[in-house]
Image (spheres, helix red, strand yellow):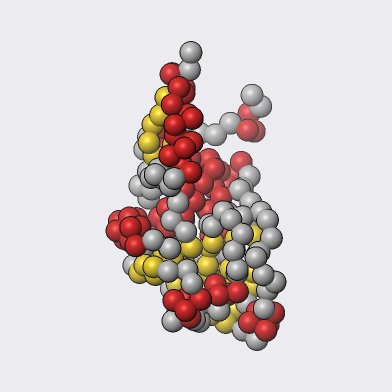
Amino acid sequence: VKEEFVLRIPEALDVKKAAPILCAGVTTYSPLKHWKVGPGQKVAVVGLGGLGHMAVQLAKAMGAEVTVITGTEEKRSAAIELGASQVIVGEDEKTLKEHELSFHFILITIPDAFDVNPYVTLLKKDGVLVTVGMLGNYKKGTDNNEVAFHRRSIAGSLIGGIKETQEVLDFCAEHSIAPEVEMIRMQDINDAFERMQKEEVRFRYVIDMQSLK
């Protein structure tokens, strides 16, 4: 292994919980850092899964006031436990309309195609919306009136480099941030995959490589 691709796991981090930081952690840390999320800012995290639950913890540790937007009431308590100060349940246009012009930064972790326009209206003037969970197209074209008249920005972000990955490992250790994981055996991967499709995992699986035979 080339030295430049080796990462140091801080002693304060549980090795089992370090693994998802190399994916979900850096994927959400990178845009939060790039757009300088910090104190005095209101941040919305859309979706509370593997990516979203890391984004909430990271944004709060950076000093932002965090709101979680989720489609299920069942995730309200988890969002609060992770550090959200507000939870909006409902991703329909009517529900979101009540929160127009509310946020400086929105991080969307939804993995499937969706209509971005209702979320754009939640941004304040000069606000930024970043999609990290979806690589396909939005369901509808963007309403440029909503973008231009408030000088809003829509952007995307994809994972992060080795430097940022080490940064997020150190940041998580410093701020006692860790993903919630469930250890599984290699032999149970198919069952775990089915549970994941049913959204029964909270929030990341980690494979015990000692179970590999």
Residue nearer the viewer, 209 or 8: 209
Name the outermost residue toward the top: 213
The answer to whether 184 is drawn above or below residue 97 in the figure is above
> Measuring 43% from the left and 18% from the top, which residue is drawn there?
211
Residue nearer the viewer, 137 or 153: 137
Residue nearer the viewer, 32 or 101: 101
The answer to whether 213 is drawn above or below residue 176 in the figure is above
> Measuring 29% from the left and 58% from the top, which residue is drawn there?
77
73 left or right of 20 in image: left
58 left or right of 158 in image: left
Name the outermost residue toward the bottom: 149
- Residue 202: image x %, image y %? 38, 45
> Measuring 44% from the left and 31% from the top, which residue is drawn there?
191
Quadrant in the rendering for residue 183: top left
- Residue 166: image x %, image y %? 54, 42
- Residue 165: image x %, image y %? 55, 43
The answer to whether 8 is drawn above or below residue 68 in the figure is above
58 left or right of 136 in image: left
93 left or right of 185 in image: right
> Measuring 46% from the left and 48% from the top, which residue is drawn there?
50
- Position of the N terminus, as image quadrant, is top right
The answer to whether 114 is drawn above or below residue 4 in the figure is below
Residue nearer the viewer, 55 or 113: 113
Quadrant in the rendering for residue 117: bottom right
